[in-house]
């Protein structure tokens, strides 16, 4: 639900009103803001799932659920979820409580370039490489929406790494401001865009030496109480989704995001896939992703989803 009555949006509306004397201009500005926040709501809560990472989660459910009231407040201890993490890292708060002194440009730098307000470099747990490819209007929409989140009064210790930041590789070298809006009519390219900013490739690909099995699945995720591997999304007819129709693809998202499935507690047979977010994606957007995945070279790769 859009939080258009929050103090953050009200302040923006008042600012716009004070800057324009013409009532038609005021109406246009307010309508534009509402549309921008609505687009940001959709992106944050269905596609790029910011509050999936920046909230407290219940890992006992079939798909981890955001604990009500923690949306955007951060606090996940990465080092507790992954014992191999080289140091200590807490996911930060992105609600207005933490970002009240940040400008939109500073937030955009963190999202798309991996650089915090104080100049610190983020590590790629924050997927700024994929977000650097986000349309500039979508970046603005995400920022507009997170400014409407309920302020959560939380803060966490600074990260402590046991390795140099250079190990995580270079920061993005492209300027997101040059990214123009993708044409939704070009279904395959739009599907590629959505799959990119949603992080499909990162979770559903594996590295083997110097080669990468794109979308072939097998990426292993260890979480409290369960171990799961990502599925093969290539159009391989026996180990991937080669025999899936468009309708079957959409149905997978709808079924796994149903209230019944999301409330299940199947023990070790859980998934890290954020079905509660992706299940909200529009049919046309899922169709675009499906069309794009059909263009990926098929890879025969059998994945045991829940290995012993």
Image (spheres, rainbow, N blue to C red):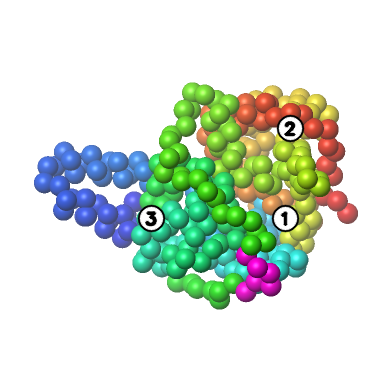
Q: Are marks 2 and 3 in contact (CB under 8 Å)?
A: no
Mark 1 or 2: in front is 2
Please report the bounds of the magenta region as a residue range.
Answer: 160-165
Decide whether residue 25 is among the magenta residues.
no
Q: CA distance from mark 1 to mark 2?
A: 29 Å
The residue most toward the right is 308
Q: CA distance from mark 2 to mark 3?
A: 37 Å
Measured along the vertical axis of the image, is residue 94 above or below residue 269?
Answer: below
The dot on residue 265 is 1
The dot on residue 104 is none
Q: Is residue 238 visible?
A: yes
Please give the residue where the numbered disc 3 appears in the rendered image: 105
Query: Disc 1 or 2, which lies upstream in sequence?
Result: 2
Judging depth in this view, the residue of 37 and 198 nearest the camera is 198
- In percent of the image, x 54 and y 63: which residue is there? 121
Residue 277, horizontal then vertical, whole percent: 57, 46
The dot on residue 234 is 2
The C terminus, quarter of image: bottom right
- In percent of the image, x 77 and y 52: which residue is there? 220
Q: Residue 74 lies in what quarter of the image?
A: bottom right
Q: Are marks 1 and 2 in contact (CB under 8 Å)?
A: no
Residue 161, horizontal then vertical, whole percent: 65, 71
Q: CA distance from mark 3 to mark 1?
A: 41 Å
């Amino acid at each position: 639900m859009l939080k258009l009555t929050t103090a953050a949006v009200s302040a923006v509306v008042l600012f716009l009103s004070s800057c324009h004397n013409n009532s038609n201009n005021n109406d246009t500005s307010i309508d534009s803001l509402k549309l921008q926040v609505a687009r940001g709501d959709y992106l944050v809560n269905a596609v790029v799932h910011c509050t999936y990472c920046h909230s407290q989660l219940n890992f006992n459910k079939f798909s981890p659920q955001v604990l009500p009231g923690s949306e955007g407040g951060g606090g996940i201890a990465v080092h507790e979820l992954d014992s191999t993490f080289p140091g200590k890292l807490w996911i930060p708060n992105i609600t207005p409580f933490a970002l009240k002194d940040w400008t939109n440009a500073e937030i955009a730098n963190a999202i798309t370039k991996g650089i915090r307000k104080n100049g610190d470099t983020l590590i790629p747990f924050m997927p700024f490489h994929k977000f650097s490819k986000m349309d500039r209007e979508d970046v603005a929409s995400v920022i507009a929406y997170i400014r409407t989140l309920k302020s959560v009064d939380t803060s966490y210790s600074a990260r402590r790494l046991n390795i140099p930041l250079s190990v995580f590789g270079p920061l993005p070298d492209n300027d997101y401001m040059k990214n123009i809006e993708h044409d939704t009519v070009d279904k395959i390219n739009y599907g590629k865009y959505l799959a990119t900013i949603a992080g499909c490739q990162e979770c559903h690909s594996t590295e083997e030496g110097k080669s990468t099995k794109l979308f072939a699945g097998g990426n292993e995720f260890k979480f409290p109480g369960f171990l799961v591997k990502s599925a093969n999304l290539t159009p391989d007819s026996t180990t991937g989704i080669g025999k899936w129709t468009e309708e079957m693809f959409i149905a997978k998202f709808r079924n796994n995001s149903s209230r019944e499935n999301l409330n299940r507690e199947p023990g070790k047979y859980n998934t890290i896939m954020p079905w509660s977010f992706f299940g909200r994606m529009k049919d046309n957007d899922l169709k675009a992703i499906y069309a794009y995945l059909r263009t990926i070279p098929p890879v025969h790769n059998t994945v045991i989803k829940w290995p012993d």
